[in-house]
Image: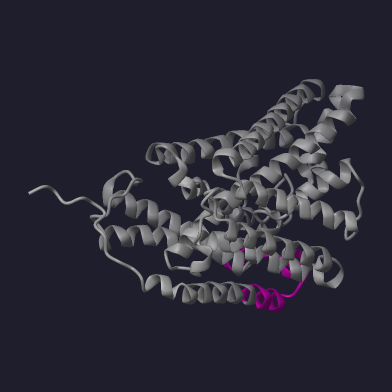
Amino acid sequence: MRADGHGRCPARLAGPDPPGAPSRRSVTARLTNYFKIGSGTAGDYIFKTIFIWVSIGVAIAALRYGKWIPNFGAIVRFAVLGFFSVTILIYAIKNGVHGYAAGAFSPSKAVFIGLVPLLIFNYVGFELQNGAAEEMQNPQRDVPKTVAGSGILAVIFYGIPIFGILAVLPVKQITGIGGFLDAVNATFSVYGGAQTALVKIMAAGFIVALITSGAVWMIGSDRVQAVAGYDGAFAGWFGVFNRRLGTPVRVNVMSGIAATIFMIAAVSLNKGSTASTFVVVLYMAISTTLISYIAIFPAVIKLRYSHPDVPRPYRVPGGMLGVWIAGGICTAFILLASFVAVFPDVVEKALGAGYNFKATWGISRLRFEVFTLGTLAVIIAFAVIGYWLGRPVREQEADLALVAAAPA
């Protein structure tokens, strides 16, 4: 999406990279500023393999030690974005800013619909730290605080630099995946002879932030998958936490293997005539993180009726009315975002904001939907098989009182 609101950017192509997988942005940083390794070379495979397994290694380490690496990554991210924001201010003082009217930031129908999946995708996952709640001293206090705090910080630390980029750079210099590094390179001209060295430092910080971000996803999501295993919703073999480390090593390794396979497929297939098709498959797989929330929010409402007496450490304010309002609004947005992701240009055309499908995605609609729905079918089949394999665990269920009986 160009800064002036024209053109079309497929939401999944502009969205986050898969957790634990080497992001295209990290590759851009490395290719532009470091080793000049060509795509598909031995060095390319080695770099991306290291990227994956460093993230997995952090997830495998005991949380009391491994948490410091993501914490370091958060510090680096704040430093990178903070220094970049200061640089934008210096650049603006020297070169001036563009004049934007308030209406310039009002999106058109096409822009709004196209960005719905991306915006919703970016704001799911803030609850991920709940997957490690058993290792917190007071999760009932800390998890809600961190969810709210991380959401506020995300808006501040991403909103300010983005606004700064739009304010000081010409529209033609603002691109998609490499836009941040392009903006860094342009604005750091204010430092004269130190520009090249500072850009390399920023690129290194960018890579560190992406690696540690992948590690955070692995720490939280792999724990959730392991809990599903020992709860009987997935194969019980994966529902094991290492006694010494306290981490789900089996799920961690499975994630690393899956990420490595995708990486090899990406390097091999993401070129020539197969590139557009593979990108559709890859980003459909990523979008399942978003689609999974279709069931999550209604489940909250359902469980409040079917299990009203179960103690709940986290509660939505406003009682059942608050649960219905929050659950209903969130489910509606998730449904809209998921439909736009799976069937793009349908809602847009209905609202008179359609676009050239093949020019945007690189393949025909029929081919797009075949591979999109086919990818979803494979993922659903994998989940069903996992649930079937968890049957022996479910057969061992026993009813236990979650609240101690009051003394006679």
Tell how many labels. 0
Instruction: Answer left or right for 91 relative to 342.
Output: right
Residue at 75% x, 64% y is 360
Magenta span main SS: helix
List the single residue furthest toward the front: 244
246 w.r.t. 198: above or below: below
The span shown in magenta is 346-373
> Where is residue 131 drawn, in percent x and y?
48, 50
Instruction: Answer left or right for 350 relative to 322.
Output: right
Residue at 54% x, 51% y is 247
> Where is residue 24 drawn, in percent x and y?
77, 52
> Where is residue 152 drawn, in percent x and y?
52, 36
Examine the structure image and report whether residue 371 is included in the region drawn in magenta: yes
Tell me if residue 137 can be seen: yes
Front residue (pair 327, 382): 382
Residue at 41% x, 70% y is 393
94 w.r.t. 262: above or below: above
Tell me if residue 177 can be seen: no
